[in-house]
Amino acid sequence: MSLLDKINKKKVPQHVAIIMDGNGRWAKSKGLDRAKGHREGAVSVRKVVEAAIEAKVKYLTLYAFSTENWLRPTEEIDTLMELMVYFIAKETDDLIKNGVRLQCIGDIQRLPEKTRNALYNCVEQTSLGTNLTLVLALSYSSRWELTNAAKTIAAEVKNGVLDENSITEETISKYLTTKDMPEPDLLIRTGGDTRISNFLLWQAAYSELYFTDIFWPDFDAESLYTAILDFQKRERRFGKISEQLEKEKQ
Ligand code: IPE
Ligand code: IPE
Ligand code: MG
């Protein structure tokens, strides 16, 4: 029985978010340069997108470049930005064929024009996809996102669009870049580190966290299914106790 067959189709996480980490260390362990690690990482993206479709995951968010990653050496940033253009050009047709809709979250204005345009084109061309929404988090960080939300909310209170007493948790969610998406059910980090690195801090309040030592370029369909099977063994209590959940099920 394959791992995919073992997945309970009624309990598939609707939204899986992944911190794709370990490209550099993967390359180093093989005596290669970091750029090669990023290129292999792009191959994993392709594999994992296909695997997510097979498993009937509806949203896949990939942390591809953080606000803090702008601090990396210029040469590495350039490599990553060019790789993005190359990857999109190569993959757009297959994304359309596979019914994948691409979306981006993050400070897209900060990306080089070529990368930005490639992304916008792909978002437009794939807009009718209904099998999977693939969300690329680019120049993204939660603190950037929450700061922007706070600014917009403050401005709307000031000009009377919003009443401060009516602000709820749902209001905050609506001012985030993820406003039209469900919250991640499962958040995976590859590469062995066990931290969140400024990713979806608000949205992951009740996500199940899964950390694996596998470097991103080695992460494949089986690795994704292993994570989903682990997720399916867990009880999500959302503050309640088991007995309450049992009763609600009946
Ligand atoms: C993740 O791999 C990709 C990006 C952050 C762009 P890294 O480049 O962080 O790889 P390590 O963590 O140095 O191995
Ligand atoms: C997190 O990886 C960001 C992405 C995967 C895009 P990093 O490699 O940048 O994280 P830190 O710096 O080790 O926390
Ligand atoms: Mg890293």
Image (cartoon, rainbow, N blue to C red):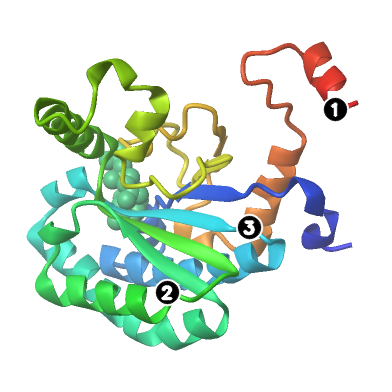
> Of label 1 and label 2, which has the lower sequence position?
2
Residue at mark 1: C-beta within 8 A of ligand 2: no
Residue drawn at (74%, 11%), measured in percent from left and top? 241
Residue furthest to the front: 160
Which is nearer the eye, 31 or 113? 113
User: Disc 3 marks which residue?
Assistant: 57
User: Disc 1 marks which residue?
Assistant: 249
**Image location (x, y in percent) of residue 97:** 55, 85
**Image location (x, y in percent) of residue 104:** 32, 60
Q: Is residue 7 visible?
A: no
Identity, as a three-letter code, of the amino acid under mark 1: Lys
Residue 169 found in image quarter? top left
Identity, as a three-letter code, of the amino acid under mark 2: Ser
> Of label 3 and label 1, which has the lower sequence position?
3
Residue at mark 2: C-beta within 8 A of ligand 2: no
Evaluate if marks 2 and 3 touch, with contact meaning CB atoms under 8 Å apart.
Answer: no
> Of label 2 and label 3, which has the lower sequence position?
3
User: Disc 2 marks which residue?
Assistant: 127
Q: In which quadrant will I find the N terminus?
A: bottom right
**Image location (x, y in percent) of residue 88:** 34, 78
Residue drawn at (38%, 46%), measured in percent from left and top? 178
